[in-house]
Image (tube, rainbow, N blue to C red):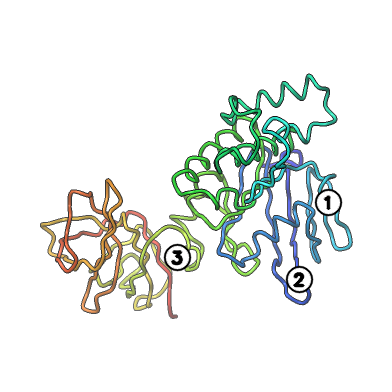
Amino acid sequence: MDTDDDIVLELRQVACQYGSLRVVNDLSFRIRRGAIACLLGPSGCGKTTALRAIAGLEPIVGGEIHLRGRVVSAPGLTVPPEQRGIGMVFQDYALFPHLNVRDNIGFGLRRWSAAERQARVDELLGLVDLKGLAERFPHELSGGQQQRVSLARAIAPRPDLVLLDEPFSSLDVELRERLSVEVHELFKSQGISALLVTHDQHEAFAMADQIGIMRGGRIVQWDTPYNLYHEPADHFVADFIGQGAFLRGTLLDHHCLDTAVGVIKGNRAYGWPPGSEVELLLRPDDVQPDPQSPLTARVLKKTFKGPQILYTLAVGADDTPILALFPSHMDHEVGERVGIRIDAQHLVVFRTRP
């Protein structure tokens, strides 16, 4: 169980608004020392406003924000950002164009002795793989290199918490995924607590220990990436996380569902009465190719992904679309019928009507 000394950041029923518009409401969560957390959600859900409030860039109209046990935000109280002892990594890097890499990284260390500052900057240049670029200026760096400088500058003073605002959104997909993993390893090796804000679930899954799914200014589920994928709290989370398709069905008994792909036995007991209308979430990995299966589907679309092909398949009398991942050597044409079997080891089911 976490003690007060373990908690770096705590939000207690925080609310923010612009004019009469409430954009964050009743937001509560904690981040323990050394943990990486994420606020994940679609555009306009309030996640960036929450991050700005934690940074001290926005006032709050309700609740409290605590850093290391000290209240830094409450209605009528906003401790300035420079007094919060946190690092910030922005989407646009926010580097000083007139300073080289070394001076950008060391900018927040001006109160350190020259020897301490040089040693820390040299250490960070190695950690972010920029040792040979210390004398270059930001315009001489690639986007990925600039973001590494921004990260090194944020962690240089050894802050208790680093806030990251969509830090990789301007980078290409491959670089974004690689940097997400590298930053996770860097923060863990340095024992740094962090809060990431993003709309990209791949980025969130690669970096975060705990993720809060936000909708309409609230957290609808705060959980591990594994539980968000396999145990979504509601239809919104299930639809937002991962890929998949919902199949309508009927509950036959506490374990079995009748759906467009046949009767499926669940891995748990459902408390709803038989005859309840339900929706079953099928992930692409729940649908396996099986040329010998009596269950067939028609190929609607296909997307080549290297080792796999993502198929959109039509099943049942009403051509309900589902997704399936096949090995890429199983190359089927649009319109072709293929044999499939449902191998859903962990069912996600929601009741649609009492």
Residue 239: mark: 3
Q: Tell which residue pokes out farthest to the right in this image.
A: 76
Which quadrant of the structure image shows residue 333?
Answer: bottom left
Which residue is rendered at x = 28% and y = 65% of the image?
312
Q: Which residue matches tag 1?
A: 72
Tell me the crowding category of disc 3: few under 14, some 14 to 19, or many 20 or more residues within 10 angstroms, Cα based. Answer: some
Residue 145, above or below 51: above
Tell me the crowding category of disc 1: few under 14, some 14 to 19, or many 20 or more residues within 10 angstroms, Cα based. Answer: many
Tell me: 83 left or right of 90: right
Which residue is rendered at x = 83% and y = 51% of the image?
72
Mark 3 or mark 2: which comes first in sequence? 2
Callout 3–callout 1 Cβ contact below 8 Å: no
Q: Amino acid at mark 1?
A: Val
Q: Amino acid at mark 3?
A: Asp
Mark 1 or mark 2: which comes first in sequence? 2
Which quadrant of the structure image shows residue 295?
Answer: bottom left
Q: Position of residue 215 (x, y in %)?
A: 59, 67
Residue 120, above or below 257: above
Mark 3 or mark 1: which comes first in sequence? 1
Q: Tell which residue pokes out farthest to the left in this image.
A: 292
Q: Which residue matches tag 2?
A: 18
At mark 1, the secondary structure is strand
